[in-house]
Amino acid sequence: NIKDEKVLKLAGVSVNPVRLRLSIPENPQLEQTGPLLITHWGFSGPAVLKLSAWGARVLHSSNYQATLYINWLPHLKPEEVRQKLLAVKNEVAKKAIALHRGVDLPHRLWQYIISRAGITPEDRWAELSNKTLNQLMQELTQGQYQIKGKGVFKEEFVTCGGVNLKEVNFKTMESRLIPGLHFAGEILDIDGVTGGFNFQSAWTTGYLAGLGAVNQKVV
């Protein structure tokens, strides 16, 4: 969850691609690039779901308290972003920054980002100081968002957890600890790459578990 009411008002806005970096104290930083969707509870989409999968255990251990850095323009180098902003400043100096985007982002998202940089709806490009320009670049290329808590139960995706794979014979899906007990699907420590149920793993492990159970010798 992102505890920022202004972000939540952008529900439905999507950007593809963005680059995400997850920072949790005393843990390696994790990165993921891909589509991002803003929802009524925060951020979602393939990039977020993949990052959640890679960082599921450390997020759990941190009680879902972390910092998320977002590069909204991963296809551009920081200096290229600066030059684009300066070009717009020269071209439409008397126009409002809020109404004339310096980069290719959804209009509502652009207005939100400039507000984070301390720019008001009335500010014009000609009034943009170097300090504010640098702050705007910061928000565009490594905006900082605080993660506090996780989604409500019905909106969650499975991203990790389940029966330890080392405890399962994958030829029959039988437990190595309890003879006659077979597993299939998400009860195992596997999941879809972007979160959620993985049909192919369910079909395959279900088939193997069925064969294993049928062919098991009855003592």
Image: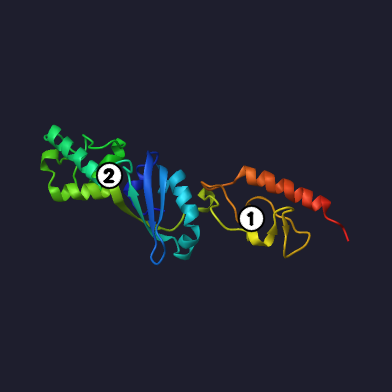
Q: Is residue 205 above or below residue 67?
A: above
- Residue type of the residue flagged with mark 2: Lys
Residue 191 shown left or right of residue 174 in the figure: left
**Pointer 2 residue:** 77
Q: Position of residue 107 (x, y in %)?
A: 29, 36
Residue 112 shown left or right of residue 120 in the figure: right
Q: 51 or 93, which lies in front?
A: 51
Between disc 2 and disc 1, the foreground one is 2
**Pointer 1 residue:** 188
- Split into 4 quadrants, where in the image is the C terminus? bottom right
Per the rendering, the mark at residue 167 is none
Q: Position of residue 205 (x, y in %)?
A: 69, 49
Residue displayed at 42% across by 43% down = 34
Can you name the residue that lies furthest to the bottom here?
A: 26
Near mark 2 (Cα within 10 A), the count class, few <14, some 14-19 or many ≥20, is few
Residue displayed at 35% across by 42% down = 10
Residue displayed at 77% across by 48% down = 210
- Give the Cα distance between marks 2 and 1: 41 Å
Q: Earlier in the sequence, mark 2 or mark 1?
A: 2
Q: Is residue 199 above or below residue 21?
A: above
Q: Secondary structure at mark 2?
A: loop
Q: Position of residue 151 (x, y in %)?
A: 47, 53
Q: Secondary structure at mark 1?
A: loop
Residue 128 shown left or right of residue 207 in the figure: left
Q: 199 or 116, which lies in front?
A: 199
